[in-house]
Amino acid sequence: MKIIETEIKVVKIIEPDCYGDHRGWFMETYNTESFHKRGIDNVFVQDNMSYSAQKGTLRGLHYQCDPYSQAKLVRCTRGTVIDVAVDIRKGSPTYGKWVSCELSAENKRMFFIPRGFAHGFLTVTDDVEFQYKCDNLYNKASEGGIRYDDPTINVNWRGLLNGIEPVLSEKDKNAPALEKCNANFVYKEEE
């Protein structure tokens, strides 16, 4: 398993080792010991899966407030997405900054998004299955969102959409700007 550092140190790209032969292939997608050795010591308690039928579906930017915040280990098992993590920890030197990663069934990459980050993804193919592990259970009362096109974050969704309009939920269309969101994360130096 290879861990790739991103511009925001705590967000990581994981490339699992994949072993193939004439029958197909095998890979280990999660191993507590391997992840702990690489600094990811979260205990995952919930697995989720979403399906997006069409290219241009944009989900996010989502988070859950403390004490129900969630770290996520995400991957795409059918199709291709551009996955984005946005630092929303007040006081962080990278507050409002984002990093992205292409995740696909073909490249088999995973993206680790720690607590204190908003998360979203854009489908770049039709027929996308997206799976993720969370280290805290879903809590509706603590969920939050930020507008996907918030100008202070400035994720380049438009460039990725190549002129098509994104397919959005009503919740995502009406999400507040970063400055007005209910996120309650505070940066801690030891992170």
Image (cartoon, rainbow, N blue to C red):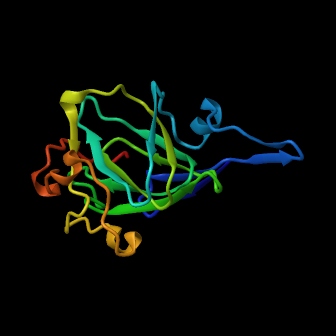
Q: Residue at x 39, y 60 (%)?
A: 56
**Image position, residue 127 (x, y; %):** 51, 50
**Image position, residue 58 (x, y; %):** 35, 55
Please tell me whether residue 29 is drawn above or below residue 17 in the rendered image.
above
Residue 65 position by quadrant: top left
Residue 33 can be seen in this image: yes
Residue placed farthest to the right in the image? Answer: 22
**Image position, residue 35 (x, y; %):** 59, 38
Please tell me whether residue 40 is drawn above or below residue 105 in the rendered image.
above
Q: Residue at x 50, y 59 (%)?
A: 125
Q: Residue at x 73, y 48 (%)?
A: 17
Q: Nearer the viewer, residue 55 or 145?
A: 55
Residue 188 can be seen in this image: no
Residue placed farthest to the left in the image? Answer: 180
Q: Nearer the viewer, residue 191 or 137?
A: 137
Q: Is residue 15 left or right of residue 134?
A: right
Please tell me whether residue 76 is drawn above or below residue 84 in the rendered image.
above
**Image position, residue 10 (x, y; %):** 43, 51
